[in-house]
Image (spheres, rainbow, N blue to C red):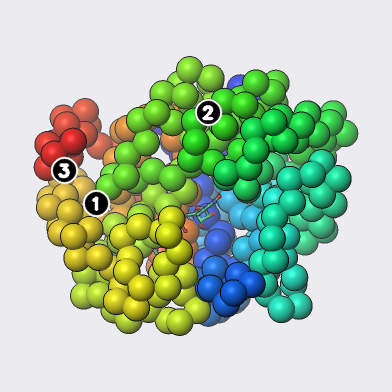
Amino acid sequence: MEITRTLGRSGIQVSALGFGCWAIGGEWQDADGQPLGWGRVDDEESVRAVHRALDLGVTFFDTADTYGTGHSERILGRALGKRRDDVVVATKWGNVFDEDTRTRTGGDDSPAYARRALTASLRRLDTDHIDLYQFHLSDADPERAAELRDTCEEFVQEGLIRAYAWSTDDPARAAVFAEGTHCAAVQHAANVLQDAPEMFALCEEAGLAGIIRSPLAMGLLTGRHAGRPRLETGDIRSRPPAWLQGFAAGSGADPAWLARVDALRDVLTSGGRTLAQGALAWLWARSPRTVPIPGFRSVAQAEENAGAMAHGALTAEQLTEVDRILGR
Ligand SMILES: NC(=O)c1ccc[n+]([C@@H]2O[C@H](COP(=O)([O-])OP(=O)(O)OC[C@H]3O[C@@H](n4cnc5c(N)ncnc54)[C@H](OP(=O)(O)O)[C@@H]3O)[C@@H](O)[C@H]2O)c1
């Protein structure tokens, strides 16, 4: 397998695997107290994990201004330090938040806010440009988004960003951004348990990269949840919002989802892969345009996830076998 990918039409090269920086933002919440982070994190371990990822050939990092209300961007900027220009950095805007109380307070889809958010992200990441700037409001109004697409083109002309994308699971919305010359990707959810055929088709047709969020089904595909360990109260999975599938409030992983993971174990762990590595291998086999961005919070997770690149993609026969097992 090629160990690099090109982000759509942009010519920007990235490792076939990126790292998702949501969890390393630490705890934050919605205005009603709903946890939006992954519980407590150890910043020093996060920095060590980023360094380990760099050493293992990972050159793509995805964060958002709102993760930990600015904390994730700061930690990533600090960890990259002098190696900033060796990597491709993606961040997002659209959510409004209060850094002091670590609370998300709403959303803003105006061009003026996009410019303010970009300025703040550049400062937190300690950089003079963002490689891939992503609109984070997944269900925003497409007409408003078309205006933001033009704003992003202005940012490109000003040298503030190199390319842009919409983080959305709706192919029709992704297609609105795809009309822009410097739109390089769509960020969307997909994993072996949750296929996204329409989005994969759109990426092919429009020449976009697919930045794949939740590639491990938020941890379900790592095997760690088989014993249904108790989740911390600050962990979004302990009180899952409606869009988060596979976990039930207060009781951890959904047994029906765990049963499907179990049924896939043999095929995913083929060739000496771990379960998590097999889940990433499924995504590479599903489409050559995918760049999975598993989240991480430790050096051990960084090593295991980056190690998936050496094993490469599943075979076409294994893809068929997965569909057969899941009755798709
Ligand atoms: N709207 C959006 O744009 C959006 C939404 C969601 C995510 N994202 C992006 O996508 C990235 C990844 O998605 P995700 O965070 O939703 O879920 P994910 O990658 O499916 O799962 C990540 C979680 O799995 C666990 N994990 C990771 N590697 C592991 C390993 N090797 N062994 C055992 N456990 C492991 C960690 O949690 P524990 O250690 O706590 O189990 C980690 O936080 C995010 O970091 C973020 O950058 C974007």
Q: Is residue 305 left or right of residue 43?
A: left
Amino acid tagged 2: Ala
Q: Is residue 283 left or right of residue 102?
A: left
Q: Which residue is mark 3?
A: 326
Front-most of residues 231 and 318: 231
Count residues near mark 1 (Cα–Cα under 10 Å), then give few for <14, some for 14-19, many for 20+. many
Residue 187 % position (x, y): 53, 41
Q: Which residue is mark 2?
A: 172
Contact between labelled residues 3 and 2, with CB atoms less than 8 Å apart: no
Q: Which residue is mark 1?
A: 273
Pointer 2 or 3: first along the chain:
2
**Quick one: SS at disc 3?**
helix
**Quick one: SS at disc 1?**
loop
Amino acid tagged 3: Leu
**Quick one: SS at disc 2?**
helix
Check the picture and name the quadrant holding the C terminus.
top left
